[in-house]
Amino acid sequence: MAVIQELETPALLLDEAALERNLSRMREKMAHLGVALRPHVKTAKSIEVVRRALVGQPGGITVSTLKEAEYFFGQGIADILYAVGIAPSKLAHVTRLLAAGRKLTIILDSVAAAQAVGNAAAIAGVVVPVLIELDVDGHRSGVSPDSALLLDVGRAISSNRHLELRGVMTHAGESYNCASVEAIAEMAELERAGAVQAAQRLRKAGMPAPVVSVGSTPTATFAKNLAGVTEVRAGVYMFQDLVMHGIGVCRVEDIALSVLVQVIGHQPEKGWIITDGGWMCLSRDRGTSKQAVDQGYGLVRGANGGSLADDLILVSLSQEHGIAARRDGAPVAPERYPVGTLLRILPNHACATAAQHERYQVVSGGSEILKTWPRVNGWS
Amino acid sequence: MAVIQELETPALLLDEAALERNLSRMREKMAHLGVALRPHVKTAKSIEVVRRALVGQPGGITVSTLKEAEYFFGQGIADILYAVGIAPSKLAHVTRLLAAGRKLTIILDSVAAAQAVGNAAAIAGVVVPVLIELDVDGHRSGVSPDSALLLDVGRAISSNRHLELRGVMTHAGESYNCASVEAIAEMAELERAGAVQAAQRLRKAGMPAPVVSVGSTPTATFAKNLAGVTEVRAGVYMFQDLVMHGIGVCRVEDIALSVLVQVIGHQPEKGWIITDGGWMCLSRDRGTSKQAVDQGYGLVRGANGGSLADDLILVSLSQEHGIAARRDGAPVAPERYPVGTLLRILPNHACATAAQHERYQVVSGGSEILKTWPRVNGWS
């Protein structure tokens, strides 16, 4: 069997044992809350990972691109929510998928978008299933659950025979910035309450809203009650990362994703260990920079994933170079990490780091490569 | 002919007219200084771009990965410098290329690395051409030009019959952080003087150093004298970007690379225009954050690349969403940018943004797509 020592660095590693633990934990959490999980595949972009995430679930997924939708439909996934507000230039693609019998649901948050989708659907002779996107935390897109606009958008959809109003969805993206587990639990309740309120307002006005979809990994992890919610969307929980660790969602040992890099030199006076892993393989994400513990561009572990005697982080990156140094700035003798030493970097942000790679080398606690799983990157 | 309005967004655009102007300017600069250009392909990763960059030059290129080396050898490039300190796990690949008759030169900066390369070369029965990497500005890797270590590394190479000492190379990466054109010119002289000094010390000690290689786009642009230098390496000058603009290397109009995105919604009270271009298509690079003018995550232009009446920048990104807003924070009426409006985002960092895409849609000042050029991403 191949081992990681034979890989050319940098290479993306996925620890299957940690992955399975993360999947089980979320599965149990959802069962405890009595809600279905619609995994968001934007982090993993891998059918192998997603099949494992779907164990015990209805089978629907969430995607972030139409390329993901194409790929996962082709792999046998039957029910897909495209959870980015629809852009008019993508409507021909959407209606083509629907005309081919695919069950694809889109989201939107304006009357103008509803009209654009309705027009495209009429031309294509299809009916487009639609969720209204809600804004519960001021994070990004969506209409407010208590706004008049919600009902206006609802009517623009429900009155159009080429559109099918399926309900509402929201994503409490601000949960990533919460300072405590209690704050995340409050955010989860805000997300739930807003989505349920919006669905009830639509129903009271005579419109259908069978779907009440919420989610983010932090809120899914710490929600205490999801009454009225029909499905939860989450993605990064599969791999976890240092940002999730920093807000209490996981332990460092739960991080299933890492980048294997190699020592290529030293600057002893500065305490620098130069590696061949730069922002190209890690991304420029600095998601921990405002957290209580700043992990630089990533936390350094040993070749097999264990902690090192030195507390090393990546302090600087260029395209194909990463500089590791002790967090406390103390010098590190070069002979502790000779040229050729393999290291694993735990990423700040799993979605961004995985996106820099075409495949996962799957390991399980050791150095054997059990299998290789491809990813579906890009947009077209 | 296809037009950009038919593309699904986000999509990477390359303006050929701006590209050709950038290439001409550098060609003239090198001719004026009497030095050969060895273009660095890490930004473009495209044979079409590189062929144009090589007009009037000897034909050698610089790469940042062995995958680039494989690809460009396959496309007919005969002389390649792999400009990242060699990692031991890549030596089997390097010696395989050399055994196949490829002219690949590597770099290193330690006796340990020289020994590792020598051992691999002996096993493979090849001779590996080597440059010693120099550190002239404390930026990253390399040995100091005035150090005893330089001669030690030189001897470790020149005394090994499986290694061929070809000379020295350095990259003044700190030039990206210079505050003025004058400071960049001084950095160029530091780079030149250090490299020439190192080569002279090697020669004086009886070692060969025919190659004296320097470069970065800023220092190449503002160098006044390159006496003693045999070649210049630069890459981002082909496309330019907001970081280069911020340090005076180019004008905004010279930026040849942009990402086409589309308006998908608004948050009118906040003055936000929501687009479908997030960090996945732009990267998380915030290279202008410490410059005199902070460009957020990118500068917003019209569909055809022209400036807008509003001074819009991207103020926030998530994976597939970008929030555009006026730089001064003033509100923007949604009807100025209706859902479906196409916008071009000029990137902070061309290398990082281009890396998020598989191909270039080549335009030239307008909306027609003249051709599509693939990129070579990844490592293996």
Image (spheres, coloured by chain):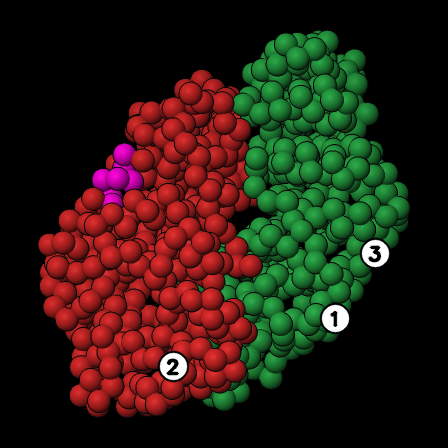
Chain colours: A red, B green
Question: Which stretch appears magenta?
Answer: A17-23
- Residue appearing at x 25%, y 68% in the figure: A213
Name the residue that disc number 2 marks: A163
Are labels 3 and 1 assigned to the same chain? yes
- Residue appearing at x 61%, y 14% in the figure: B120
Amino acid on which the number 1 mark rests in the picture: Met
Report in which chain the residue with disc 1 lies.
Answer: B
- Residue appearing at x 17%, y 55% in the figure: A30
The quadrant in which residue A33 appears is bottom left
Indicate the position of residue B60 as horizontal and vertical percent values: 79, 36
Are labels 2 and 3 assigned to the same chain? no
Amino acid on which the number 2 mark rests in the picture: Leu
Number of marks: 3
Between A236 and A116, the one nearer to me in the picture? A116
Q: Where A149 falls versus B53 (above or below)?
A: below
The quadrant of the rendering that contains the N terminus of chain B is bottom right
Q: Are marks 3 and 1 in contact (CB under 8 Å)?
A: no
Amino acid on which the number 3 mark rests in the picture: Ser
Quote the CA–CA distance across marks 2 and 1. 33 Å
Q: Which mark is residue B1?
A: 1
Q: Residue B253 colored magenta?
A: no
Indicate the position of residue B114 as horizontal and vertical percent values: 62, 17
Name the residue that disc number 3 marks: B24
Q: Give the secondary structure at mark 3.
A: helix
Mark in front: 2 vs 3? 2
